[in-house]
Amino acid sequence: MKRPFLNAIALCGIGCVAPSSFAERGAVELAETEIREIVEAKCIRCHAGAGPGPFQLLTDADLTRHGRTMVRAIESGIMPPWLPTGPRHFFRDDCRLTPEEIAVFVAWKDAGFPLKPLPSHSIKLIPDVSSILSVDVARGWIPNAEDPDSLRSFAIPLNNPNPLLIRGWRAVRDEPTFIARYNLLVCEGNEGVELDDSDPGPGYLRLGDLRAQTSGSAGALGVDGSFELPSGFAIQIPANATLVAEVRCAGRGRAESAGATLRAIPANESDRVVREFAIVPDRSAPSTRTNQRVTVITEPLESSLDLVAVVIRPDVRARSASIRIIAESSEERTLVEIPLYLPLLDRGYVLSAPLTLNAGDRIQFSVGYDDDATTRRSTPVAVLLVAEPARGSVVARETPLPESSTPAQYANGSTPAPHGIEFIEVKTDPPMKLGKTEVTQRQFLSVLRRNPSQFAADPKPDPTSGHSLDRPVDSITWYDAAEFCNEISVAEGLSPRYIFHGIHRDSGGSIASARVDITASHGYRLPSEAEWRLAAFGVGAALPAADGDRTQIEAIAWLAPWAANTSHPVGTKDPNATGFRDLIGNVWEWCEDVWNDPNASGPPRRVVRGGAWCDGVTAASCDFRSGIPAGTKNSPFGFRVAVDVQPTAPTFAP
């Protein structure tokens, strides 16, 4: 069966289609604001001028000019480009649009594509990266303009005198709208160069695989021209290495260059080096070929591995692909599910956080084809990039509560920080800073691009409830709060505090379970219970409880008697004696500490403090606390962020 060819507009991929419900809310002005936010989050990677998109979307004029084309492609399911299904944000750079986001574009179209000017507004570009290596690939190769599938491999000596560690690659293409995919491997020796030199045309007519190495083991750049491992992981390039690039592309009816400049993103010396775990029929494991499907199941893993990225090469004639993990108990977990495989929109898929493959697990790789003949002669390949498990991580610890003789001092006022979070310094030993308010839905959405809050739907805000995005984010698991802390750490160049293994997400993208190591990093984190209590009550003090001054409690806390069965925008109550807001009431706040209860059973529990909108005035007591399973996702649970005060570098007199 012949596949339809995707034109330039189709370059930006597979989305989901939903009926318009946004227009019914009569919120065109909100749509104008959200259009910019969605474009910045989901579109700018390809439509930034130098990206592969056929036009740029950097200004309001760009958005208005191309609005009709954008909405038509979004409604038809063409934009933006993404093949795997499953939980959102399981993989990094997941650019699928939600039904609500699609409805925003529809409402914008129905209103005539208006965009009110905003003062000093500009779309934020994805920051460029410093590069330790730039390589020209396929430069000068002009594929047949009518060929729907052209493939050549190119070998480029890197001439690097010393070994290098890189995190990934960014591509700048000769033809921004040209559809091409680059599968990479790095090897020692000149075999690839000799093959290249022996072919009269540019590159050589075979796959980039060499000996036991598989193309894709050094990454795969697809439609968005980017491949970057998670923080803490790296690809190793030996000294005097050769880069082999397997370039697959399609002609679009006119002569175009398939060339690109690949820029290597530097990594840190402390990063863990990944290696390939290749799944190839009858080479790594026996295959079965039945019902137009090739299936490979590996032998059980001998030891645990941390999986960080997946590269699939199922053959351009494939129509579907999947990878599943089969545990010793025979329980199956889906890693990748692509119900409709479109090779021109494929890429390497990097996990948002490492996934632990346990000893005894088997990997099942299955690819569907259109006919039996293709099934018999195809050799699909999957490359998993894995690393050995981290060693020596610091385990979660119980922090003792402060002695009553310890003085508590606070900085005057608060200090702003990235992502709109304000902090107040707490003079503990060592000193730390704690968020002045709970993390809001707006802040959580800007960092993790999702909002699980039960109290998010507020189409008609009023003076008493305020806009929902200014309320604390709720329905947050302990793992979600830790993931948020990691993200803002990485954004500021700090090492993540929390190392995740074996992540399981629910359908909304929230982390339902995982194994977490807590490191000694000074990155953003959750407060210890001791730190939280010190900020809430000072030393040796407690607010009046149910039998005390109710007026004093009501002034600073949203609790059940007056909260009207809902959360409220942060900071709308008075600050407490130490300058913090909403430490009591509004939402329970996760702490970093493990809840140690010998009588408790089931999944691991973490400490929560402060009570919520659904609790009575007893929540104002200093002793009001609980231990909750870390995967709990209910509307009373949120969090605030802490960070250590960075030590000042010593100065020396001359």
Image: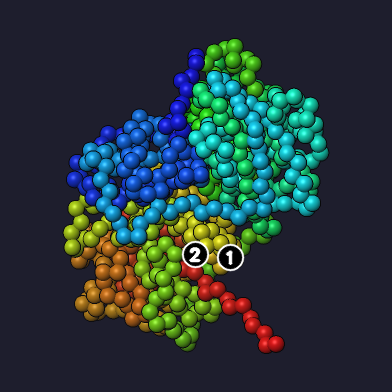
Is residue 101 in sight in this rendering? Answer: no
Q: Is residue 43 above or below residue 312?
A: below
State if disc 1 and disc 2 touch (CB < 8 Å).
Answer: yes
Residue 592 pos. (x, y %): 48, 64
The residue that label 1 is drawn on is: 521
Residue 494 pos. (x, y %): 56, 63
The disc placed on residue 453 is none
**Image point (52%, 25%), residue name:** 254
424 or 265, nearer to the observer: 265
Mark 2, Cα crowd under 10 Å, few <14 / some 14-19 / many 20+, is many
252 or 225, nearer to the observer: 252
Residue 139 pos. (x, y %): 65, 35
Number of numbered markers: 2
Q: Is residue 270 above or below residue 370?
A: below
Three-letter code, disc 2:
Arg
Q: Is residue 603 above or below residue 177?
A: below
Question: Secondary structure under badge 1?
Answer: loop
**Image point (31%, 60%), residue name:** 119
Q: Residue 122: which quarter of the image? A: bottom left
The structure's colour scheme is rainbow
Left or right: where 62 falls relative to 273: left
Mark 1, Cα crowd under 10 Å, few <14 / some 14-19 / many 20+, is some
Three-letter code, disc 1:
Ser
Left or right: where 180 falls relative to 30: right
Is residue 157 in sight in this rendering? Answer: yes
The residue that label 2 is drawn on is: 525
**Image point (53%, 32%), residue name:** 179
From the image, which quarter does the C terminus lie in?
A: bottom right
**Image point (50%, 65%), residue name:** 524
Residue 364 pos. (x, y %): 59, 30
* Residue at mark 2 to residue at mark 1: CA–CA distance: 9 Å
Question: Secondary structure under badge 2?
Answer: loop
